[in-house]
Image (cartoon, coloured by chain):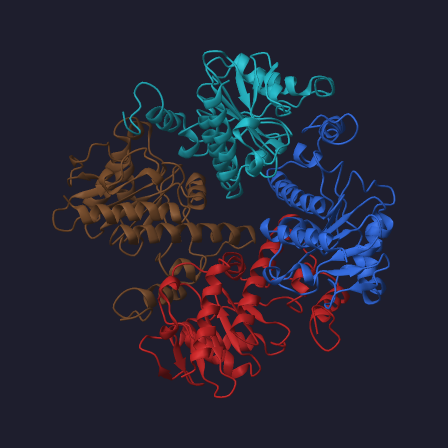
Chain colours: A cyan, B brown, C blue, D red
Amino acid sequence: MHESLKEKVLEANLDLLRHKLVIFTWGNASERDPETGHIVIKPSGMPYNEMKTRHMVVLDADGKQLEGDLNPSSDAATHVVLYRNFKNIGGVVHTHSEWATSWSQSGRSLPPYGTTHADYFYGEIPCTRALTKEEIEDDYEVNTGKVIVETFRDLDYGSMPGVLVHGHAPFTWGKDGRDAVHNAVVIEEVAKMGFRTEVLGHRDPIEQFLLDKHYLRKHGKNSYYGQK
Amino acid sequence: MHESLKEKVLEANLDLLRHKLVIFTWGNASERDPETGHIVIKPSGMPYNEMKTRHMVVLDADGKQLEGDLNPSSDAATHVVLYRNFKNIGGVVHTHSEWATSWSQSGRSLPPYGTTHADYFYGEIPCTRALTKEEIEDDYEVNTGKVIVETFRDLDYGSMPGVLVHGHAPFTWGKDGRDAVHNAVVIEEVAKMGFRTEVLGHRDPIEQFLLDKHYLRKHGKNSYYGQK
Amino acid sequence: MHESLKEKVLEANLDLLRHKLVIFTWGNASERDPETGHIVIKPSGMPYNEMKTRHMVVLDADGKQLEGDLNPSSDAATHVVLYRNFKNIGGVVHTHSEWATSWSQSGRSLPPYGTTHADYFYGEIPCTRALTKEEIEDDYEVNTGKVIVETFRDLDYGSMPGVLVHGHAPFTWGKDGRDAVHNAVVIEEVAKMGFRTEVLGHRDPIEQFLLDKHYLRKHGKNSYYGQK
Amino acid sequence: MHESLKEKVLEANLDLLRHKLVIFTWGNASERDPETGHIVIKPSGMPYNEMKTRHMVVLDADGKQLEGDLNPSSDAATHVVLYRNFKNIGGVVHTHSEWATSWSQSGRSLPPYGTTHADYFYGEIPCTRALTKEEIEDDYEVNTGKVIVETFRDLDYGSMPGVLVHGHAPFTWGKDGRDAVHNAVVIEEVAKMGFRTEVLGHRDPIEQFLLDKHYLRKHGKNSYYGQK
């Protein structure tokens, strides 16, 4: 079942490789079927250049495996938590992309230093708190999802489609898998430029009105970027 | 109309991709027809690998759309202001290239640290002041053009074919679209090397006479670089 | 003899090039035949794009050349020492990859700053002490192997499949040549991200329980990453 | 005349592009014919992808143009000075490669921080003094050569096949054009790793005996790297 969705998810995963966000078997992209709520995700530990549509794994909304001979990504439980709590998203991506991961490792949120950031992320990209020993030893992947949800208690996941997990790496999401990949590329770009902005001696985020202008000219009802 | 110019503008835009100055739909290149003063520019929000000659948009000197089914680049108004004020230019480029954008985000002008810089930019590449709240909320793209023009009040746009817009990214120009792309590549190179020069502990621009030598051996009536 | 092993060793060496860990004739990969204990290694000073299976050199467990018209890699003696002392390894790789070499040159061990590191290296990747004048002048390559072994006196080479040689560059190992290459890629990735993590202002390794979780979900009897 | 040498020089120049040491028309490689002392060099300002064997320019030992419809590289006079003073070299290369140029711009000599450096450059790679106003305004390219020669008054150009010109960029040389290109690649690699070594907090060159070991195992009468 979900054959066309499997194709889309395969392509989203291969895009991670094309954008040089992953090597070997690292990273994973998934997408949710809007009707059934089923989640299609890549299998665990399979190299990208061997992956075919038939290897994609189908899970139900609770993460129970419905189809597929292979184990799902070891991070599948995190995806499930995100889909359950972020009702309007349709795709999730996790990578260890080099710049965003460096920020995650530093335990720092990424301030909006310019309009590239503002075009996609409406404010500082948050870094979660570190997980406790108990949260790591017991149900680690579920708790990774939960700490992301906790981080968004007062944040809008719709206008902030990504997060840096403390000591780990980024997760991004979007309206589908392709959109989540897009946001994974952008978080990497702004992490890279943010690093260099700081080395050049700058530490102030852009003004709120510039952030508003760029975010809102691309998103929302008065947007005017792109075509109708 | 302007079919051959559309081809040139398409190529200039694709060159941005080839030189890795843009990803997705970011960036834009335009060129002005010297006879009519019409401006050909890429459409807004279209991926580079789908763009064809027929998608190019034609504007008059005031930015009014003369031809094309698609909306022009959202930054078209900035291009229009630059063409109106910098009489002798024939091409304009805007990118979010990673190194020049990092300098823009830092709000710093880029000092001439070596002869690579001096070969193309005759002095410090200026960073504009930040736009005010009013300038951003009302006619943002026009005001981006105006703040660039203001920055060049006492500068020669002919020998300084680029600028860093505060908190945003670079604009470059030249005698045509291809030349503006060329300058966009060079600003990226010197932004990268300038960053590293500073990290190595150096903060003094090169001497004026070395700047003169390199700029003037490539440009102007006594130049001797290249072929006649 | 060892024709299929030679093919594997050639491929492992070519993978170093594909992963951009080596240029010119730099670097070397070897593999040990588990039955005879013979070692197949690349020849010294031969460009990767000219290397064929027939150029591979066969050594016995003491480093004596058994087959091959060409001299073995100048670092062959280091490989021999590692195979002799690390009984369970089947492959060794040496590169001058740019990030791991920068750490080696700094004389610093590489702290585990994130889960990418923890997925492969169970703790800080050690940097050896500097060799003495005597160790360098007499039997340099053997002594390079010995100082690595000395560094692992209280470390488990099984869960720490790599080392930074002081003032020199990394060595990695694994169950075969391919696995050693894999670890050479990972040491480069974590060296790069570790550098950036420090520049971003962070200097604390991740907690032991997060290190345990990630290492042990991929390795050992209770691992659950990948397929059975 | 010198048809086969022209082919070699063309290839050496194209190698600069392949190794990503140059963009556009930047950089130049030349080679000297050992019998006649004639120098073959690339033309000025011609893009690499349009360059053919027939475009190569032949100069005599004094820099007088013997053959070729095009002007020689604007840096030809510097090459001539180097060939005249460094009797045993057969090739010269100049690039604005990004890392070595950053060191040149910082006005700093590049200390030997590791064995990669020691394998090719026997000690600190010197940075010249800055040229004076007079030296720049009058016979600039000749004086660039002269300041390099001055820098090597007490240095052996044979074991130190490169230099950083203050505020400008590197020059390298070797037994032929291909060898000079090789050294241009290596200077770039060690400039990159040296930068990172310093950022990681390290500022001491390697010990003389390690420098000796690595340089001498590759060069000179007791070398044992590579094949006989």
| Horizontal relation, residue C86 to residue D46: left or right | right
Point 74% across, 70% down: residue = D224
Q: Position of residue D183 (x, y in %)?
A: 57, 67
User: Quick one: D154 or C84, which is closer to the camera?
Assistant: C84
Q: Where is residue A128 in the image (x, y as percent from the top left)?
A: 60, 23
| Horizontal relation, residue A137 to residue A104: left or right | right
Point 57% across, 26% down: residue = A127
Judge whether C222 appears above or below A36 on screen.
below
Residue D225 visible to an observer of this rendering: yes
Q: Position of residue C226 (x, y in %)?
A: 67, 29
Give the total of numbered labels: 0
| Horizontal relation, residue B49 to residue D184: left or right | left
Point 52% across, 85% down: residue = D34
Point 67% across, 58% down: residue = C53
Judge whether D226 appears above or below C61 on screen.
below
Q: Where is residue A31 in the image (x, y as percent from the top left)?
A: 50, 21
| Horizontal relation, residue D202 to residue C20: left or right | right
Judge whether A34 appears above or below B11 on screen.
above
Instruction: Give the position of the C terminus of chain A as an image quadrant.
Output: top left
Judge whether C198 appears above or below D107 on screen.
above
